[in-house]
Amino acid sequence: MSFEPDESEIEASRAPLLDHLIELRKRLVICLLALGLAFGVCFAFATQIFNLLLHPFSIAAQLLAIREAEAHAGAFDFMAVMVGSKNMFLALTGAIDLPAAPGKVTSLVFTAPLEFFFTKVKLAGLGAVALAFPVLAWQIYAFVAPGLYKRERHAFLPFLLAAPLLFILGAALVYYMILPFVLWFSLSQQIVGAGSISVQLLPKVSEYFDLVTNLVMAFGLCFQLPVVLTLLGMAGMVSSKTLMSGWRYAVVGVFVVAAVVTPPDPISQTLLALPIILLYFVSIGCVKLIEQRRAKDEAGQDVVAI
């Protein structure tokens, strides 16, 4: 009785339970050391990292300065509004320079004695996970790889690379597009220069950090949709035909998820939903390619069997 090559690989890689526990301990120790070192580095530069997180707030204030300059220019002019919107978009993408915003528009406050300290601790913790992610991902792969078939190892690696790249893409969209627009909308609600009435936005340090991290996590996780659907397609749990026939329900579901995970404003909800819908159709294409490759492999096996 002969075994398939993949079966022999699995048989050769089997080890007693104690060996697996020793290997797991080794991988966990490496992961903890990497996280501890990364946490120390991130906490040492926590103030500088938090200043980077404040950049979208500064951009939002400068975008507001553009809009206020247009408002002071005169009466309503449709072309002026269109030109102003174009300038705001170009300024947001860095194509043109932004005017300096007057006043301390990027001021934040904290109302508890240790609020900023604990915010820096949380910031260092998240930064440590991001900084140590290559080490963590490799340790996870090194632990599970001996128990996988060769073809499964080859299929696992692309997803291990695609997942962080898609997460970074979602985080970059938040940092450069979504967050400045959300903050610009918030700043535009201020009441300034109305006699004795003044309503200004002074966000707390912890609340601003929570807003940034919630948006980054929401967009980063939602951008994993192609990875999840492609894995389900490889497992045979979904098909490209099923995904394509249910695209209307998927669009509704995407907007519902966007409404739940983003702040209660239509701008951020729409800007999350549109890329996710695009990624959904990209996922259909990925599943279709998998199905075509599977059909080709099965046809080749039938030819060999004959």
Image (cartoon, grey):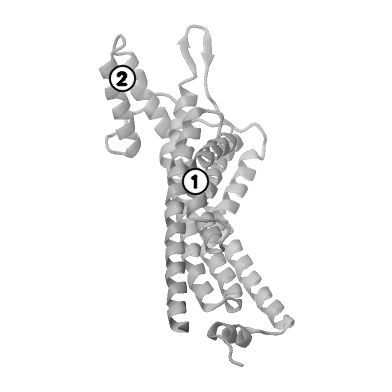
Q: Secondary structure at mark 2?
A: helix
Report the residue at 61% width, 43% height from top.
Answer: 119
Q: Position of residue 206 (x, y in %)?
A: 61, 37
User: What's under tag 2, amino acid-wise?
Assistant: Val
User: What's under tag 1, amino acid-wise?
Assistant: Ser
Report the residue at 65% width, 31% height from top.
Answer: 111
Report the residue at 50% width, 30% height from top.
Answer: 107
Q: Position of residue 54 (x, y in %)?
A: 47, 38
| Residue 190 showing in the rendered view | yes
Report the residue at 44% width, 58% height from top.
Answer: 288
- Locate the C terminus and report the quarter of the image it occupies: bottom left
Foreground pick, 259 / 184: 259
Outermost residue on the bottom side: it is 1
Q: Which residue is mark 1?
A: 245
For label 1, the crowd category at 10 Å Cα-Cα, with few meaning under 14, some 14 to 19 and many 20 or more, is few
Q: Position of residue 121 (x, y in %)?
A: 62, 49
Outermost residue on the front side: it is 306
**Number of the front mark, 2 or 1:** 1
Residue 240, placed above or below residue 32: above
Q: Which residue is mark 2?
A: 81
